[in-house]
Image (cartoon, helix red, strand yellow):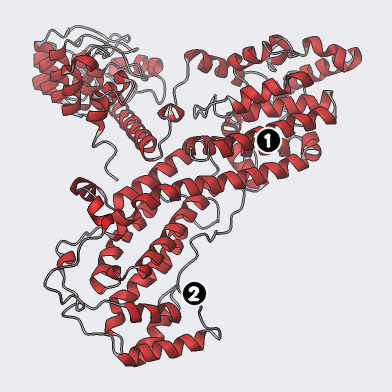
């Protein structure tokens, strides 16, 4: 598998990538001069590019290139007609950013092309105040005091800090913070693109973008009434009728696309939980059962239909786990939905298997060329073997002929680590619990190790000392990936440890191949027993099929006799049909779901209630646009009632009764007062 960025230019220019503008912005951010140049010179793509349009952070391409010091990109954009005086939301221009980061050559280029040296930010600062380079300050024509290492002048300290706020790009050390933030964004976008290509998923499903209206709405909801789990307040449920269940399931499950934006990602779980609350406390068990049964059947249908879409699978594992957490946390639903919770656990486990199988399928396609046939040591493939006596070398098999020279060059262990990284990225993008993520990647590596183990034993060309050295170097890159991408949870084994255990049998086979020809009869037992994961039966098979190099000593018969004796000693049964030699690639490691305590620490305030901010992220809320869609369906309550958080119970008085309605309103008001004075501060 090639680097997913390698063929990007042809894809963009040929129209394979639909959003030319976003590709243009990303290429500018990645300092890809050749591709930016092609995009700007090609008539088709140039017409779709708006040079001065900002990216998601509000910065035009010229500002980003000036901030990072991309001289060639800046020159290219200026020649193409970019506005040298364009600025971001804070009034920072390309010249301001170049000055702030001391990119002197870029600043001078901007000035030569008409950049306004006297332009000021919204805080009233000019470019000359942000540079420590005296030569640049002279070019800017100003001798005023500059904002130095702390990011501000002495007399502007309070003003700058108060207006920018903590953690703002434009505050203290603003240039460095902004540059670091952009690097992180660039890395995130690269990972998203790589995941989209490797896993063949929609890049839109990996986007974090959300509309300003959604962000404002979520901020307002976060400032509202704290969610009460001990009882169901009228404003903390979703009102519906039985006839509207199909519409709810359709919008929340069947037609809801996978989204990773924090406000949109948990919407299905939130809606289904709030609806379940209404059914539990103000309706009938039959309606609650109908809602949950329809929901679970719909989710099962979606994941089975989209079994090869990892974003969809991850999205629904995340929502099923969150819904299960909600149901367990609500005292009434915890008891009445025990069967639904069990079905959710089964559904999560089944979807987990689909995620693992999807990753394994993609790795299997490149396993041979990326690991088994890839040689990190030059000249190793030319080593002559003792069984090669023919004048002409063996004809290449069809699989080798089918690989083009370019594909051979592109295939490497990085192809595998890239797929692992993409899988990790998608699982984390949808906030899967670390316990599930660690187990999934460990299972994938375990399967890959077993698959490689069997392929080596099935093909004699891999069973030599030199090839074993080559393969060991390739596997070390997988081990390095696990080390650099290690994930952990509480006191459970971390990802690096699990991957090491998963690879141990294949690593043991490679160790045996490297030393078996030099084994003496008296060393056989101690060496075989000392290699982790290798049995005497497998060692005997290796000895019988081993390929010696021309300069290597053949395995003595006495060694094979000792191995045969050791094999009889280890097992009282006789191997048939390869039993005990090849590994079962369908073997599943034990899988466990997060416990209630694990869920509290991930979704709630944690043990002791110290993670209040984290708890707010997983409070059941609904976006207004979904409420409006549901309100248009037959039998749904009005927006004021269905919204669930702002207008009270409204028209459900008829369902609850006048006396109960007044009681609920009084309890709600008492809860508001309790929240204000901090009475409700416990942890469920």
**Is residue 60 placed above or below 324 in the rendered structure?**
above
Indicate the quadrant where residue 675 lies.
top right
Q: Earlier in the sequence, mark 2 or mark 1?
A: 1
What secondary structure is found at the residue carrying circle 2?
loop
**Quadrant of the frame with the C terminus:** top right
Along the horizontal axis of the image, is 20 left or right of 665? left
Indicate the quadrant where residue 643 lies.
top right
Along the horizontal axis of the image, is 508 left or right of 550? right
Along the horizontal axis of the image, is 559 left or right of 115? right
Instruction: Say if residue 226 shows up in the picture.
Output: no
- Give residue 505's position: percent from left, percent from top: 42, 68
**Residue at 33% across / 77% down in the picture?**
545
**Is residue 172 placed above or below 156 in the rendered structure?**
below
**Is residue 393 placed above or below 84 in the rendered structure?**
below
Viewer-side residue, 61 vs 659: 61
Tell me the distance, in whole angstroms, between the alpha carbons under discs 2 and 1.
42 Å
**Residue at 58% across / 39% down in the picture?**
304
**Is residue 543 placed above or below 9 in the rendered structure?**
below
- Between circles 2 and 1, the one closer to the viewer is 2
Along the horizontal axis of the image, is 240 left or right of 320? right
- Give residue 490's position: percent from left, percent from top: 55, 52
Name the residue tied to disc 2: 577
Viewer-side residue, 470 vs 573: 573
- Give residue 317's position: percent from left, percent from top: 58, 39
**Residue at 39% across / 54% down in the picture?**
482
Q: Is disc 2 surrounded by few (<14), some (14 to 19) or many (20+) residues within 10 Å? A: few
Q: Which mark is residue 610?
A: none
- Give residue 519's position: percent from left, percent from top: 30, 86
Q: Which mark is residue 297?
A: 1
What secondary structure is found at the residue carrying circle 1?
helix
């Amino acid at each position: 598998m090639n680097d997913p960025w390698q063929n990007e230019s042809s894809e963009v220019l040929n129209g394979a990538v639909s959003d030319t503008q976003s590709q243009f912005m990303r290429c500018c951010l990645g300092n890809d001069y050749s591709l930016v140049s092609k995009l700007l010179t090609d008539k088709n793509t140039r017409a779709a590019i708006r040079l001065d349009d900002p990216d998601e952070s509000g910065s035009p391409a010229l500002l980003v290139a000036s901030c990072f010091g991309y001289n060639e990109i800046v020159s290219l954009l200026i020649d193409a007609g970019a506005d040298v005086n364009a600025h971001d939301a804070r009034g920072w221009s390309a010249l301001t950013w170049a000055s702030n980061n001391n990119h002197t050559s870029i600043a001078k280029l901007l000035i030569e092309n008409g950049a306004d040296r006297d332009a000021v930010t919204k805080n009233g600062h000019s470019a000359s105040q942000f540079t420590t380079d005296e030569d640049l300050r002279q070019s800017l024509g100003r001798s005023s005091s500059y904002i130095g290492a702390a990011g501000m002048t002495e007399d502007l300290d309070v003003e700058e800090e108060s207006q920018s706020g903590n953690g703002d790009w434009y505050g203290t050390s603003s240039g460095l913070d902004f540059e670091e933030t952009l690097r992180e964004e660039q890395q995130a976008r690269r990972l998203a693109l790589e995941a989209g290509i490797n896993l063949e998923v929609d890049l839109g499903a990996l986007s974090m973008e959300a509309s300003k209206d959604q962000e404002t709405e979520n901020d307002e909801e976060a400032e509202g009434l704290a969610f009460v789990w001990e009882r169901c307040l009228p404003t903390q449920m979703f009102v519906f009728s039985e006839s509207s269940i199909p519409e709810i399931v359709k919008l929340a499950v069947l037609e809801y696309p996978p989204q990773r934006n924090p406000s949109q990602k948990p919407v299905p779980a939130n809606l289904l939980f709030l609806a379940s609350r209404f059914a539990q406390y103000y309706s009938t068990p039959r309606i609650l059962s109908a809602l949950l049964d329809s929901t679970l059947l719909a989710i099962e249908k979606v994941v089975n239909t989209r079994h090869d879409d990892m974003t969809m699978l991850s999205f629904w594992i995340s929502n099923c786990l969150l819904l299960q957490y909600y149901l367990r946390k609500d005292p009434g639903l915890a008891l009445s939905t025990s069967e639904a919770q069990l079905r959710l656990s089964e559904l999560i486990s089944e979807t987990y298997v689909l995620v693992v199988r999807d990753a394994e399928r993609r790795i299997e396609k490149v396993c041979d060329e990326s690991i088994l046939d890839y040689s990190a040591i030059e000249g190793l493939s030319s080593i002559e073997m003792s069984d090669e006596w023919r004048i002409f070398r063996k004809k290449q098999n069809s699989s080798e002929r089918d690989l083009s020279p370019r594909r051979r060059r592109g295939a490497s262990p990085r192809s595998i680590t890239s797929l692992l990284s993409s899988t990790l990225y998608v699982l984390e993008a949808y906030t899967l619990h670390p316990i599930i993520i660690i187990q999934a990647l460990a299972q994938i590596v375990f399967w890959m190790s077993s698959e490689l183990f069997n392929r080596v034993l099935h093909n004699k060309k891999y069973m030599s000392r030199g090839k074993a050295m080559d393969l060991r170097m390739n596997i070390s890159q997988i081990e390095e990936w696990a080390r650099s991408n290690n994930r952990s949870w509480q006191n459970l084994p971390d990802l690096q440890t699990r991957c090491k255990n998963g690879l141990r049998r294949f690593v043991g086979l490679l160790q045996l191949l490297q030393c078996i020809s030099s084994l003496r009869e008296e060393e056989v037992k101690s060496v075989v027993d000392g290699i982790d994961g290798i049995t005497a039966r497998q060692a005997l098979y290796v000895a019988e099929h081993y390929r010696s190099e021309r300069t290597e000593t053949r395995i003595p018969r006495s060694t094979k006799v000792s191995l045969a004796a050791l094999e009889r000693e280890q097992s009282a049964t006789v191997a048939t049909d390869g039993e005990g030699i090849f590994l079962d690639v369908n073997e599943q490691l034990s899988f466990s779901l997060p416990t209630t305590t694990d869920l509290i620490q991930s979704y709630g305030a944690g043990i002791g209630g110290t993670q209040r901010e984290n708890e707010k992220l997983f409070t059941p809320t609904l976006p207004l646009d979904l409420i409006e869609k549901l309100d248009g369906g037959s039998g749904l309550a009005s927006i004021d009632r269905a919204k669930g958080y702002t207008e009270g119970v409204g028209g459900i008085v008829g369902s609850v009764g006048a006396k109960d309605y007044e009681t609920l309103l009084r309890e709600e008001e008492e809860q508001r007062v309790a929240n204000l004075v901090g009475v409700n501060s416990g942890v469920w």
